[in-house]
Every structure is written in structure tokens, then in C-alpha cells.
Image (tube, grey):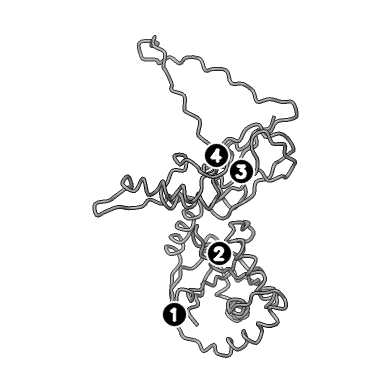
Amino acid sequence: MLEFRFPDVGEGIVEGVVVRWHVKEGDRVTEHQVLAEMETDKAVVEIPAPQAGIVGKLHWVEGDTVKVGAPLVTLLEEGEALPTTAPAAPRRGATAVGELEEEETIAARPPRREVLASPKVRRLAQELGVDLARVTGSGAGGVVTEADVRQFSRKGEEARPTDAYGPTEQVPLIGMRKTIAEHMALAKRIIPHAAHLDHVEVSHLLKRVEADRGEAQAKGVHLTILSYMIKIVAACLKEHPYLNATVDEERGIIILKKYYNIGVAVDTPDGLIVPVVKDADKKTLWEVAKELQVLAKKARDRTLALADLKGGTFTVTNIGFLGGHHAIPIINYPEAAIMATGRV
């Protein structure tokens, strides 16, 4: 029998939320087979089985927060059974004058009902403040649907929290949202922020984009201005190395990066994340555009790996889709600078 614990997946991760189980109790699994998807404060990661075996026990249900090192799955060998736990002996209290005669009665905690729901439905429930354990699923096999969550939310409208001025909604600050909040607060506190705003004539760039669209379609690539901006930024950073740098306060030095990994701020339902295009200066325009497509899809599907979010040296964020011309974003610590592009 192996009690497999939630492993340290690196980057200072201390806990994760069970997004989805890929197995159920009684399943036979092979080594490296995915057991679960866990949402850490940086990405959703797949947890593989450390060895082959039979799933004896899943220690958590979807939506639970698990600390690194806590039991995650118990794996059994063929023919092996879970050990039975002997009932605990009655506990007696003690005082300065001796042992109390009455036995302390401890109420058993009722087992949690496993909730069957997709990650999308779980996010909706979180947004609406609905406890999925109280919702009766109408889907096949008792699966909770979006309609179930919305109907339950409407029924519980009167029970929603309020403040002195009216009704409110409570959204848990956990996982990625919590880390984003802490990261931005840290960056604003320790990095001196200065901003420069300007208008740039880009008619020639728009003509270039239109001229390249045919070739892009032939290559199966979705071409946007952002692909060009990443290439332009990588070239400019070579001329302005102090914008592609970080400060090592302990050693009292500025580290000028000689590689150009451009982060792209992406807005998702779970918050702002920054996947990174590695070695943007060495890649062709088509390679950059293709990589942006892949990263955007991963962000939407919540399948970004930690490696997709690491190693950035400079960040680009675009507010043009909102219709705005200027923005003053927070620098993505520990980088030295960030650029926001507005509406063209």
C-alpha cells in the first residue's frame, strides 16, 4: 500500500485545489497515469501516479484545498485491502485533582458527499456563492449542471450576504486570484513606477499585417498585431538593455538579461495570467503567432503548465480590445518594465 501525498510541484507552491479527478476508487492505474488536475496559485497541473496499482481511496473531493504533503490518493497492490481502523478508546479528561469519570463523547463528522460537476460549473458556483454540496444534480448520474446552480442561486437570493447598504456577493480569494493580488501588491510596493504615454503612427504596420494575412492563412496561423509587437519589443530591448533587467537587492547589482522572453498578459475568468513567449528574438513572426495561438488556447482551457508562465524578462499587455487608448499597468515583478498597447 502506498499513501501518495500531494507533491511539491515547485515554485514555492504550498497548496492546491482539486479541479478534477481522472480516476475513481477501485480503478486500476499505470505508472505516470494522470490521477487528478490540481489548481495551484500559478497554473492547473496534472498529478501523475508514482506507480501502478489500484485506487483504494481518494482523500479529497473536487473543490477541496489540499496542502503540499497531505495524503492525496491511497494506492493498493493486487489483492490488498485498505486497513480497518480500530475504534478509538474513550478519552477521559484530567484535572488537578485527578481523572474525570465521565467519558468524553466525540461526534463523528459526517462524510462529505462527492459532488459531480465540471470545472466550468464549479467556477459558476463560486461566482454565485453557491455551495455545490447543497445542490441536487439533474444531469446523468447526478451531475450538477449550470442550470441547477443558477436555479439554486435564485432560490437562495434572500439568504445572500448584505452590508449596511444592500446585498453583496462574496468571492473566495483563493488559488490564482489570491496569488495575483499578492504579486501585484508586492510589485506596486517595492518597484518605483513611472509612466510615459504616447501616440504612435502605425499605418505602415497595419498595411504589413494585411499584406501578410494570406501567407499566414496558408500556414494555418492566425495573425494579429500582437505578434508584430512582440518581435518589435524584442528588438527594442536589445537597444535598451536596462528595460530587460532585474535588480538583485541582496547583492546590490542589476542583472541585464541577454535573452528576450516576452510575457503576454491574458485575462481569464480566474484572473490575469502571463504566459511567456520564450526567445522571441530568435523566432520567426510565424512561430511567434503560432505560439500565441497555443498559449491562448491553453489559458482558456486552463491547461497552462508552470513552464509556460516562467522566465519572462518583459511583459506586454493590450487594452485596445476594451476601446481605451492609454493604460498604466503594474510592472510584473521582478521585471523592470512593462508596455501597454491601446486601441489602433
Amino acid at circle 4: Val
Residue bearing the label numbered 2: 274
Q: Report the residue at 65% width, 33% height from top.
A: 74
Q: Considering only order in the chain, which callout, 2 or 3, is on the residue closer to the N terminus?
A: 3
Amino acid at circle 2: Val
> Residues at badges 1 and 3 in contact (C-beta under 8 Å)?
no
Q: Distance between the residues labelled 1 and 4?
A: 45 Å
x, y (%) of residue 259? 65, 71
In front here: 184 or 213?
Answer: 213
Q: Considering only order in the chain, which callout, 3 or 4, is on the residue closer to the N terminus?
A: 3
x, y (%) of residue 163? 27, 51
Locate the N terminus by quadrant.
top right
Q: How far apart are marks 3 and 2 (CA)?
A: 26 Å
Q: Considering only order in the chain, which callout, 1 or 2, is on the residue closer to the N terminus?
A: 2
> Around disc 4, counting alpha carbons within 10 Å, would you say few (fewer than 14), some (14 to 19), or many (20 or more)?
some
Amino acid at circle 1: His
Query: Which one is closest to the eye, mark 2 or mark 1?
Result: 1
Query: Which one is closest to the eye, mark 3 or mark 2?
Result: 3
Q: Distance between the residues labelled 2 and 1?
A: 21 Å
Q: Report the residue at 47% width, 14% height from top.
A: 90
Q: Is residue 193 above or below residue 87?
A: below
Query: Which one is closest to the eye, mark 1 or mark 4?
Result: 4
As drawn, the label of residue 61 is 4
Amino acid at circle 3: Trp
> Residues at badges 4 and 3 in contact (C-beta under 8 Å)?
no
Q: How far apart are marks 1 and 3 (CA)?
A: 44 Å
> Around disc 3, counting alpha carbons within 10 Å, would you say few (fewer than 14), some (14 to 19), or many (20 or more)?
some
Residue bearing the label numbered 3: 21
Residue bearing the label numbered 1: 325
Q: Considering only order in the chain, which callout, 3 or 1, is on the residue closer to the N terminus?
A: 3
Q: Report the residue at 49% width, 74% height from top.
A: 321
